[in-house]
Image (cartoon, grey):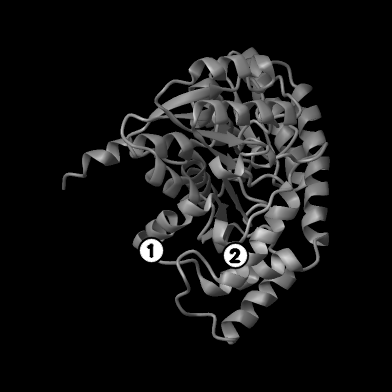
Amino acid sequence: MKLANRMNNLGTETAFEVLAKAKALESQGKNIIHLEIGEPDFDTPANIIKAAQDALSNGYTHYGPSPGLMEVRERIAQEVSETRNISVSANNVVVTPGAKPIMFFAMLALVDEGDEVIYPNPGFPIYESMINFVGGVPVPMKLLASNNFEIDINDITNQISPRTKLMIINSPNNPCGSVISKEDLTALAKLAQENDFMILTDEVYRKFLYEGDYFSPASVPGMMERTIILDGFSKTYSMTGWRAGFGVMPENLVEPISRLSTNSVSCTASFTQIATLEAMNGSQEEPMKMVDEFKVRRDVIVKGLNSIPGIECPMPGGAFYVFPSIVGTGMSSKQFANDLLEKYGVACLAGESFGKYGKGCIRFSFANSMENLNEALNRINSFVTVNS
């Protein structure tokens, strides 16, 4: 069998590969602490599960409209309008099975072969994968450890060309946990206006902001017409397996994005959409507790990693990852991640999994219990001591 040439341009998400390897080691009897996968370790709140069960009993088991159930789109529009201080309606919303389709559909709809897309590097690996797959030219927005993984506006300005079609922003960032300031987000929005390109703002970690107030580039005056907000319920409500996401976009993009949905996934499961209504309308106590717990864990893992010789770990402002430099250990990040898993039972990801500028770093997810995080820190310390 000969695969289509376009498959050569399609990457993967290393977290799932490492998870499979870790599971295989577990099946052999090895104790593994999972710090590789980007998934909250909390269960979906009971009220959301109950809403889905009721929806199934009430007949929400059939096809729905490709852009989503109207009552869900209306509620999402209300939520986004209130939290971003903008005015959007249901006609700006497309509901998808998870947030990834918005990423894929936006690029399919906007990016022609040869168009340039500026994207965060290190960043979520599917950005670069999708850019390549649709024939675009990936232009890395460099996030360097030497700059605390913050963006450099001057550098980005110099990367813009007449071929720039789209800029991807992710704040808080996966894998770095860095947060782009309101000032810098406003500057990026101005660049989009002045140079006539679109912004795709990935806001799935919006609720996982540990200090300050959240700001979206869509909030900059005049930006809603050139911004696509990507968001979902997987992280905020611990609903990763439910596959519930959405995009908020200019109205003239809704029809083509919906058509891509029709041609690929048909629609998002109706009972899942009803569950998202309860997620938004019901008590926010459990999600808030989860974020509070993550903040405590963040402080523990950062302090613990910085106490290990050869490791330098900046304090992430959001998300639930740390991205320390391990250059001082003398090991490459790939060797570090591989040996730490195989010899000490701690699963993590090499920085290169998130782009070439992640070299020399490791991503640890702190979406695990405090007990496991402390044990992982002990194992990492032992590993570094033996191998440095």
On residue 322, the disc is none
Q: Which residue position holds label 1?
A: 262
What's the amino acid at mark 2?
Answer: Arg
Front position in the image: 379 or 225: 225
Can residue 199 be seen? yes
Quadrant containing the C terminus is: top right
Q: From the viewer's perspective, tell me whether residue 66 is left or right of residue 115.
A: right
Q: From the viewer's perspective, tell me whether residue 303 is left or right of residue 98.
A: right
Furthest residue in direction left, as rendered: 1
Front position in the image: 117 or 81: 81
138 w.r.t. 41: above or below: above
Task: Give x and y (percent) for residue 95.
Answer: 53, 61
Tell me the residue at 57%/52% (across/down): 248
**Which secondary structure, mark 1?**
helix
Tell me the residue at 38%/45% (across/down): 108
Q: Which residue position holds label 2?
A: 73
What's the amino acid at mark 1?
Answer: Thr
Callout 1 crowding tier (Cα within 10 Å): few <14, some 14–19, many ≥20? some
**Which secondary structure, mark 2?**
helix
325 w.r.t. 48: above or below: above
Q: From the viewer's perspective, tell me whether residue 159 is left or right of residue 81.
A: left
105 w.r.t. 318: above or below: below
Can residue 331 be seen? no
